[in-house]
Amino acid sequence: MNTDHSDLNKTIEEMERMGLHPNSHRDNEIGLGDIVEHILNKMGITEEKFKQWFNLDECNCSKRKQWLNGLLSWKKNKTQPKENA
């Protein structure tokens, strides 16, 4: 089977113009990792402070957040105002 990549690329570009992007469905979701990050930030525990406390160059916080979000996520309540972190 011979596929023409230019046709596939045109299709992807058209879908992106329509607002369809990979993981765009996640814009209306919130996950467990987002909640954990929000709570820790409210308590003053940021990624930078964590790295400082434990003398780390990288803490992999983003990777853990992504993993937790993949484990448990749900739709955001559209009637609730968006809160700044």
Image: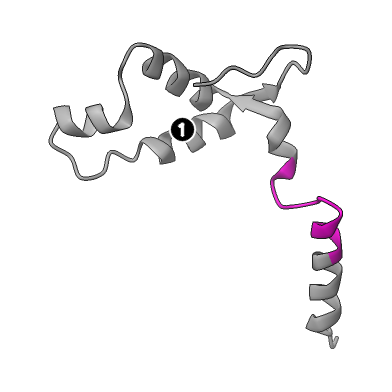
| Residue 84 horizontal/vertical position (percent) | 54, 20
| Residue found at x 86% / y 79% | 7
- For mark 1, does the 10 Å Cα neighbourhood hold few (<14), some (14 to 19), or many (20 or more) residues? some
Asked if residue 82 is positioned above or below residue 14 in the image, the reply reads: above
Q: Amino acid at mark 1?
A: Lys
Secondary structure beneath dot 1 equals helix
| Residue 70 horizontal/vertical position (percent) | 58, 34
**Quarter residue 9 falls in:** bottom right
Q: 44 or 1, which is in the foreground?
A: 44
**Quarter residue 15 falls in:** bottom right
Instruction: Look at the image and give the residue range highlighted in magenta.
Output: 14-24
In the image, 67: left or right of 80?
left
| Residue 39 horizontal/vertical position (percent) | 43, 14
In the image, 48: left or right of 37?
left
Q: How many numbered markers are drawn?
A: 1
Asked if residue 64 is positioned above or below residue 44 in the image, the reply reads: below
Residue identified by numbered label 1: 65
| Residue found at x 50% / y 37% | 66
Q: 49 or 5, which is in the foreground?
A: 49
| Residue 54 horizontal/vertical position (percent) | 15, 31
For the rendered model, the colour scheme is one colour
Q: Residue furthest bottom?
A: 2
